């Protein structure tokens, strides 16, 4: 299975995502924002970072990149697409996911190992988790406050499309403690925290067993692997 | 060159943390007459040629579709400035 990671000007976590993909046994494929070519990948990751320096709005200019035409088309055709942090911001700017992300309510950039609850384990990127499983992955953002109008929130909650919810504390003022959502079909998932930073012992969040041993992010990538092979 | 000015504001019902931080700073500096600050954006679009209705309509369209995100912001003004 080949999973593409698109690099935009200002992407930071593209190589972490490529490494995560390699660690679960898939073939990572580096894609470039300026091309109109997905190079035949089976799934796509929009990585974290600060594309275009967050100018205009976070993810806004990147969402109009040449390759995004192909991404939108592939997503609408059912291809798994995961947007992490800045990638999540691109997905809402591209209208592949509803709502928006605004500056953290406390006004500060925040970086912490964050507990999330997986509330939808039927998406392309979450089917390896148990329902309501609590996981710990790093969070790092300045504009991660999820907002949507009442109607959209009701729809997301009613249809079980809140894929991840913050547990213990709400790090950025997101409505309903929403950390990540999915589209109705379950192939497009976006979240602010970073699964690709919790995939290898020695480099992940601390656990009760050992420092930096957390690898809860792996299941995002094993989920999509099994979904496509199945 | 003719210029069209587009102004975009965060939606009134949304928290504007940047504005809030500035309001807090003003209060600390003793400017107590100002109780609230909201921060928006101003775009100056330089036009090649006269500003026709079609150009203005195009500016309105990009203001709503690209320069703002209607989920979190409102376009408050699209006008030609002479």
Image (cartoon, grey):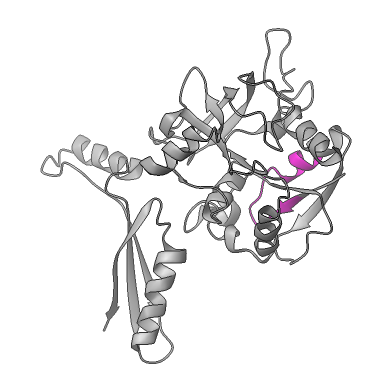
Residue farthest front in this picture: A159
Left or right: A49 in relation to B65 = right
Q: Tell whether position A16 is magenta.
A: yes
Q: Is residue A134 above or below residue A62?
A: above
Residue at left offset 41%, top offset 52%: B71
Q: Quadrant of the C terminus of chain A?
A: top right
Judge by depth and name the residue closer to the eye, A108 or B75: B75
Judge by depth and name the residue closer to the eye, B59 or A188: A188
Q: Which of the 4 image quarters holds residue B22?
A: top left
Judge by depth and name the residue closer to the eye, B81 or B69: B69
Query: Can residue B1 be spotted in the picture?
Result: no
Residue farthest left in this picture: B33
Q: Please state the total of marks drawn on the protein image.
A: 0
Residue at left offset 47%, top offset 54%: A57
Q: Is residue A119 above or below residue A33?
A: above
Query: Can residue A100 be spotted in the picture?
Result: yes
The picture places residue A24, in percent across and down from the top left corner, at: 85, 32
The picture places residue A52, in percent across and down from the top left corner, at: 57, 57
Residue at left offset 72%, top offset 30%: A127
Q: Quadrant of the N terminus of chain A?
A: top right
Q: Is residue B73 above or below residue A19?
A: below
Residue farthest bottom in this picture: B49
Left or right: B33 in relation to A47 = left
Q: Tell whether position A187 is magenta.
A: no
**Start-end of magenta stretch:** A5-19
The picture places residue A63, in percent across and down from the top left corner, at: 58, 58
The picture places residue A139, in percent across and down from the top left corner, at: 58, 30
Q: Which of the 4 image quarters holds residue B9?
A: bottom left
């Amino acid at each position: 299975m080949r999973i593409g990671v698109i690099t935009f000007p200002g992407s930071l976590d593209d190589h972490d995502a490529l490494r995560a993909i390699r660690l679960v046994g898939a073939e990572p494929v580096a894609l470039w924002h300026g091309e109109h070519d997905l190079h035949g990948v089976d799934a796509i990751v929009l990585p974290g970072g600060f594309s275009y320096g967050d100018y205009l709005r976070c993810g806004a200019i990147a969402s109009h990149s040449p390759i995004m035409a192909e991404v939108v088309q592939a997503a609408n055709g059912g291809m798994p697409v995961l947007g992490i942090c800045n990638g999540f911001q691109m997905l809402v700017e591209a209208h592949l996911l509803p709502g928006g992300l605004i500056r953290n309510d406390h006004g500060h950039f925040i970086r912490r190992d964050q507990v999330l609850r997986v509330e939808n384990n039927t998406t392309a990127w979450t089917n390896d988790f148990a329902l309501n499983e609590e996981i710990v992955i790093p969070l790092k953002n300045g504009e991660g406050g999820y907002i949507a109008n009442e109607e959209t929130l009701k729809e997301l909650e009613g249809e079980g499309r809140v894929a991840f919810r913050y547990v213990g504390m709400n790090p950025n003022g997101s409505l309903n403690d929403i950390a990540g959502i999915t589209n109705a079909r379950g192939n497009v998932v976006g979240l602010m925290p970073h699964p690709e930073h919790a995939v290898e012992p020695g480099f992940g969040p601390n656990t009760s067993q050992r420092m930096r041993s957390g690898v809860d992010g792996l299941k995002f990538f094993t989920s999509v692997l099994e979904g496509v092979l199945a | 060159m003719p210029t069209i000015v587009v102004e975009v504001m965060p939606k009134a019902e949304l928290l504007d943390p940047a504005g809030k931080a500035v309001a807090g700073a003003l209060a600390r500096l003793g400017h107590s007459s100002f109780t609230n600050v909201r921060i928006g954006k101003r775009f100056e679009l330089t036009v090649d040629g006269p500003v026709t209705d079609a150009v203005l309509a195009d500016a309105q369209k990009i203001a709503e579709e690209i320069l703002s995100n209607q989920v979190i912001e409102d376009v408050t003004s699209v006008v030609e400035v002479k």
